[in-house]
Structure formats: C-alpha cells, structure tokens
Amino acid sequence: KNFESDLAAYRDLPSTQNLDEDALQTIAAYQHMDRELSNLATHTRAEAAQRFGNRLANEFRQRVAGPSPSAEPRQRFGGLERVPKYAVQIAGMSLGLVLLAVLALALSIPLTRMPMSLGQPRVWKTGNTAPNLAQLSRFAYGIAVDTTGPEPVDTVYRAVTDLGLTWVKQDVSWETYQPSAKMRPVFDRLLRGLTSAQETDLKTLLSVSGAPTWTQTSTQASSVNDGEGTPPVDAEMYAAFLGELATAVCHTSVKAIEVWDEQNMRYAWADQTPDPQAYMDLLKAAHSAIKNACPTMLIISGGLTPAGQNPPQSVDNLIYMDKLLALGMTKYADGIGVHLPGYNVPPTADLASACKVITADHAHFRGACDSPHHSWSFRSTLDEY
C-alpha cells in the first residue's frame, strides 16, 4: 500500500513526472525499503538489511559480468544499461548498521546512468551526450568507511567494490593514535585495514583531525566536542604527526591526505571564530612534513562546510575560500576539499533555480526562498570556487 501511494505521488511530482515508469518504481521501491527497515527492531533490521544487500550485490555482479547466452536480455533505461541503484553494507557504527543507499540523486539516476560500453556515445533523455568512459579516467567515486570497528575489514571493502566504487575515505583521529606526547604514533590497527584495501585495488583518502588534549591549552581542551574539533597550539605538532603517518602509509593504498576538516566552523576550530590565516599555517606545516615523508602523496585542503557569514559560529565558505586563495593555498594543496550537502537540490540546479525544487511537494529541506543562499546549491558553490 505504501509503495503504491509513493509511486502515485512520484508520478504527479513536476520533478519526476517525465521519468519512465521503471525509474519511478525504483525510486518508490527505495523509499519503501527505507521505511520498512526503519520500522524494524535493531537486530532484525540488520538481518533484513544484510539479506537485502546480498541480493542486490549478487544482481550487480551478474549484470556487470554480462548475461550468459541463455540469459534474459538486460533491461534498459532509455538505451542505458540498468544496474542496481543502491546496496547495503554492514559497518561499525552505533547500531552496527550503515545503509549505503547509493540512490545518488534519486531523481536523476535514470537520466545520468553511464553506459557500460566504450562504444558510440549515447544521448541521455536530457539531450546531453553521455561522455565516453575513456575520457573520465581521472574521475572516480568513493565512499566513507570505518575499518577500525568490530566488523571484518574484508566485508566492508567487498561492499565498496560491489558498489563499483574505487576510493574510500577513512577518518583518522590524531588523539586515537598518539594520546600522549611521550609516545610515538602507533598505526597497526589502521595499517591492517589499508592492507585489505590495497588487495582489492581500492585507493584511500585519509582525513586527519582530532588533536589530542596534550597539544592544546586547557581552555581549548575543554571546548566544544571535548577538544575533538580543536587544532593544536603549535602547527608543527600536527605536522610531526602527519609526517609519521605519511611515512607509515606511503606504500599502502593511501594516495591522499586531507588536512583538517570544516575549519570554517566554530565547532571545528577551538570554539573560536574560524581563522583562515591560522589554517594556512597548519596547511603549510602539513605540506612540508607530508611531502618530505612521501613525495607522491596528494594533499587535499580541508573541506569547507557551505555556510553563511555568522561569526563567531561560522565564516561563509566562499569568503573563507577567497582568503585562502589570497594567502597562496594552491602552493600547498594538490586538491581542494569540498563538502556538497545539496539538501534536496540536484547538482544541476544553481541558486536561481534551487527554490523550484525546495518548494516542491515532498521536499525535505525548505529554505527561505525570499532570501536564498548559495549553500543550498552545490552547483553555485562549485561555480564560485
């Protein structure tokens, strides 16, 4: 009953009424699956999710491998190969369950699915020509994982590869690996996971923050998030840790290190007004230490959170980015970290058209459209960057 009502609603929505029936059913099925899983008790939810994920993973393998001569022809979305839209991974979070619902941009999936072959370019329903896969060799999708939890690391990485992804992001809390100034960092637990990633040909991005209390003033250490969002008093302390880390992981699956995260937000910056110059000091010291330890390692600037200008709580990410560029950030970073929440606004919509989606029925995020803000639209954020 819920599935049918969802399907009927999607048929009537302006944003989805042009999609074919198969696509609408996929979206409604995901909505139904999400609702049903959330209604189950925790232990049965995990069991149901695992069964569901295994079935989808098997279907995905079969479709990618191609049908046998006697198999049914593949179904298609307007000439594009149809593959599963989402899968499930059991990972070490608070309930031991993470649904990796890669229904990425649910309303756009049937329009933007990449063709499986490298042959003649296809034309999507939007009228755009699908790019040849060979032209996208430098582009890849990844997903955040936690390989330090109780679940077997191989299970986590199998789920990632079943999704067709080639990168993973792993958060690294400095305090976890060096809780005392008297000890050198020990990365055994991290390295075990990285070995499995290398065996599955996955590339890894490490995002490093969470300075230990011994690197902070007493005021900083007692600040927001128990000091987890607080940088060290001395940037060289952070650089020394990153140098040790880069040395340890240089010949593993790790290909990039993100230097801090969300530094334009007060909760990630010592409970003080975010300071671009102070972050640049951190980035410069980190760059020198990482490149000396592992010259091939890519350095990514900390991803800024799309936000408004509301000091001391936040600094507008566009203003913050302008200041970083003026301070020479591109000399010390191989890539720019970007956060792309997007809410319910698709990546093709700029700020001018975002409110058409925001005001639509069933939109979960509803901004004040009499005063629109660039943080609602990843497209506008990216264009400004």
Image (tube, rainbow, N blue to C red):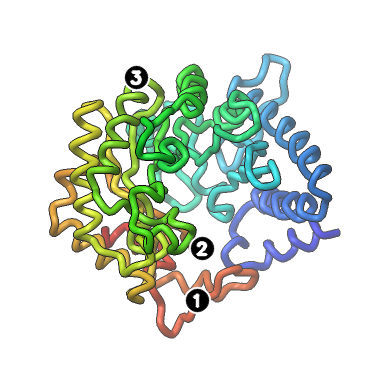
- On screen, residue 111 versus residue 231, left or right, reads right
Depth check: give the residue in front, 257 or 360. 257
> Cα distance, mark 1 to mark 2?
10 Å
Q: Residue at x 49, y 63 (%)?
A: 345
**Do residues under tags 1 and 3 come within 8 Å of each other at their CB atoms?**
no
- On screen, residue 84 versus residue 49, left or right, reads left
> Quick one: label 3 or label 2, which is nearer the N terminus?
3
Say which quadrant the N terminus sits in: bottom right
The amino acid type, in three-letter code, at marker 3 is His
The amino acid type, in three-letter code, at marker 1 is Gly
Label for residue 367? Answer: 1
Residue identifier under label 3: 251
> Which SS class for mark 3?
loop
Q: Is residue 379 visible?
A: no
Q: Which residue reaches farthest bottom?
A: 370
Relative image position of residue 43 (x, y in whole percent): 81, 43
> Which SS class for mark 2?
loop
Residue identifier under label 2: 343
**Do residues under tags 1 and 2 come within 8 Å of each other at their CB atoms?**
yes
> Cα distance, mark 3 to mark 2?
37 Å
Q: Residues within 10 Å of mark 2 (few under 14, many from 20)?
A: some
> Quick one: label 1 or label 3, which is nearer the N terminus?
3
Depth check: give the residue in front, 219 or 318. 219
> Quick one: label 1 or label 2, which is nearer the N terminus?
2
Q: Is residue 268 above or below residue 150?
A: below
Q: Which residue reaches farthest top?
A: 69
Say which quadrant the C terminus sits in: bottom left
Q: Is residue 218 above or below residue 171?
A: below
Q: Residues within 10 Å of mark 1 (few under 14, many from 20)?
A: some
